[in-house]
Image (spheres, rainbow, N blue to C red):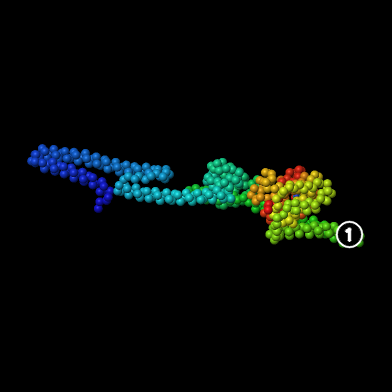
């Protein structure tokens, strides 16, 4: 059986030969040629020459067409190899070339689909890497960085441009991390370590060797454990602070009891003095336990907050009145400076008064001379510097308690809202207090969906701000 291809090549030749032969027989059958051997010889010779030239030309024509189509396919393959996947398929050609071209086209389409799928998967993977909170670095056998995600750049304080193609040692820049990678390289197994990078960054690093194509590669994962570490510190400090706070009144109580036991009981005026000291210590302990219980109740949402529409003056006046005598005694000006026409707010009056009590009490406690001012800003009159802090809150009144006291150091400022946190100055100056007041105040404000924060300059004074939603 002849194939299609064979027919396509053979048929033109057969037709050509038939035409030439037909011409020859027509020529020979003419009366003037019958019996003329010269005529026959000339006719056969001419026919042979015509056949030779025409078959050569036809052969050249057919082979050049084939060559042309094969060239097109070769060029297409070349384009595809160069990654130019949009190159159109040759549309010319018939028969086998057409079939081949079509099959090749299907192959290219399939290939394109596969590549699109792979590209989609690769994009998804890159998206995951971009949005991952953990830092990821991929390095080759020699430790040259091939890929680093944004979290990796952020944690190591670099950029992808600066990191890619540089060595891990240059990118990690921390001797413990570099040691870890070298250990991983030598031992060829996973290595991990918790590393403190600088003062405020605590990382857990895991370096894993893996096989990439023919050679070894390394995957570095950096997890930011700073917050967890900070929470651990807060918890540790909380336990140590509560023990410390309990130890002082308990030691004092023990001293009082021992003194009474060894004879002070027989001296009524001394016994009275000691009993009043014991009474004071018991008060301190009771206050601490009550504040702790209060804090835990507010934190767990067990204290119901009953919001009602209230005038700001009704929230501020009572606490200010309460502290007037103390301020006068300490020669500190206690100023209530509320603007007119303040909108009403949603507040649980008792709770908000408790917040103002705590803030004013602290302000007086940490101010030796000068003033303590209580003021408020309505939403349309809030200064820009304060507005920045509450951009995401609904329209709110900001109440401020400002003092000209000792101020708070930046380190303390970030921690004063933690339970039991007291600055060293507060401890060393023997200022009373449990260190729970601000923690309670912040929780009350948060239960009102508001925000409480502070600004301070050491030696210049502090300002505490909190927000209440306008009614
Ligand atoms: P305390 O009962 O000890 O006052 P707080 O939680 O109210 O506890 O305050 C925690 C710490 O914050 C205080 O010990 C003090 O160091 C600091 N602090 C609070 N308010 C002020 C202020 N107005 N001026 C300076 N320091 C302050």
Q: Position of residue 26 (x, y in %)?
A: 13, 43
Q: Quadrant of residue 154?
A: top right
Residue in the picture at 39% in, 48% down: 108
Side (left or right) of 212 relative to 435: left
Q: Quadrant of residue 309?
A: bottom right
Is any atom of residue 25 visible in this view? yes
Residue in the picture at 39% in, 43% down: 78
Q: Secondary structure at mark 1?
A: helix
Residue in the picture at 34% in, 47% down: 101
Residue closest to the eye, 155 or 399: 399
Q: Position of residue 361 (x, y in %)?
A: 78, 51
Q: Residues within 10 Å of mark 1 (few under 14, many from 20)?
A: some
Q: Position of residue 99 (x, y in %)?
A: 32, 49
Side (left or right) of 75 relative to 29: right
Is any atom of residue 239 visible in this view? no
Toward the left, the furthest residue is: 35
Residue in the picture at 72% in, 56% down: 348
Side (left or right) of 83 relative to 385: left
Side (left or right) of 31 relative to 403: left
Tell me if residue 171 comes above or below residue 279 in the rendering: above
Q: Please count the marks in the image.
A: 1
Residue closest to the eye, 305 or 68: 305
Residue closest to the eye, 401 or 160: 401
Q: Position of residue 227 (x, y in %)?
A: 65, 51
Q: Is ligand 1 less than 8 Å from the beta carbon at label 1?
A: no
Q: Where does label 1 land, which residue?
A: 272
């Amino acid at each position: 059986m002849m194939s299609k291809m064979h027919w396509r090549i053979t048929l033109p030749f057969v037709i050509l030969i038939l035409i030439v032969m037909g011409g020859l027989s027509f020529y020979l059958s003419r009366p003037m040629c019958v019996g003329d051997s010269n005529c026959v010889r000339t006719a056969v010779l001419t026919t042979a020459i015509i056949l030779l030239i025409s078959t050569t030309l036809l052969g050249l024509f057919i082979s050049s067409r084939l060559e042309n189509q094969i060239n097109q396919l070769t060029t297409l393959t070349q384009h595809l190899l160069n990654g130019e996947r949009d190159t159109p398929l040759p549309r010319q050609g018939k028969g086998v070339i057409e079939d081949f071209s079509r099959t090749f086209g299907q192959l290219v389409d399939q290939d394109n689909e596969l590549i699109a799928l792979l590209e989609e998967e690769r994009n998804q993977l890159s998206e995951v890497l971009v949005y991952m909170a953990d830092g990821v670095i991929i390095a080759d056998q020699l430790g040259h960085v091939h890929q680093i995600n944004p979290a990796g750049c952020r944690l190591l304080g670099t950029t992808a441009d600066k990191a890619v193609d540089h060595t891990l040692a240059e990118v990690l820049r921390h001797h413990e991390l570099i040691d870890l990678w070298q250990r991983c390289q030598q031992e060829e197994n996973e290595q991990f370590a918790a590393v403190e990078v600088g003062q405020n960054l605590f990382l857990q690093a895991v370096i894993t060797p893996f096989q990439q194509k023919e050679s070894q590669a390394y995957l570095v994962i950096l997890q930011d454990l700073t917050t967890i570490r900070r929470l651990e510190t807060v918890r540790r400090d909380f336990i140590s602070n509560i023990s410390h706070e309990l130890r002082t009144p308990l030691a004092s109580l023990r001293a009082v009891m021992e003194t009474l036991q060894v004879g002070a009981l027989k001296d009524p005026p001394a016994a009275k003095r000691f009993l009043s000291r014991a009474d004071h210590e018991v008060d301190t302990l009771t206050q601490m336990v009550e504040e702790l219980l209060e804090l835990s109740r507010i934190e767990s949402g067990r204290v119901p907050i009953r919001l009602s529409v209230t005038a700001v003056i009704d929230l501020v006046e009572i606490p200010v009145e309460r502290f007037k005598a103390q301020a006068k005694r300490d020669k500190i000006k206690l100023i209530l400076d509320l603007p007119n026409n303040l909108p009403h707010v949603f507040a649980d009056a008792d709770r908000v008064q408790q917040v103002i009590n705590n803030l004013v009490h602290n302000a007086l406690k940490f101010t030796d001379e000068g003033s303590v001012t209580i003021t408020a800003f309505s939403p349309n009159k809030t200064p820009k510097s304060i507005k920045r802090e509450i951009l995401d809150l609904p329209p709110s009144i900001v109440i401020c308690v400002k003092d000209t006291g000792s101020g708070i150091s930046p380190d303390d400022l970030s921690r004063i809202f933690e339970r039991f946190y007291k600055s060293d100055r507060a401890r060393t100056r023997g200022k009373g207090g449990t260190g729970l007041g601000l923690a309670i105040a912040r929780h009350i404000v948060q239960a009102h969906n508001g925000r409480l924060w502070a600004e301070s300059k050491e030696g210049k004074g502090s300002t505490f701000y909190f927000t209440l939603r306008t009614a």
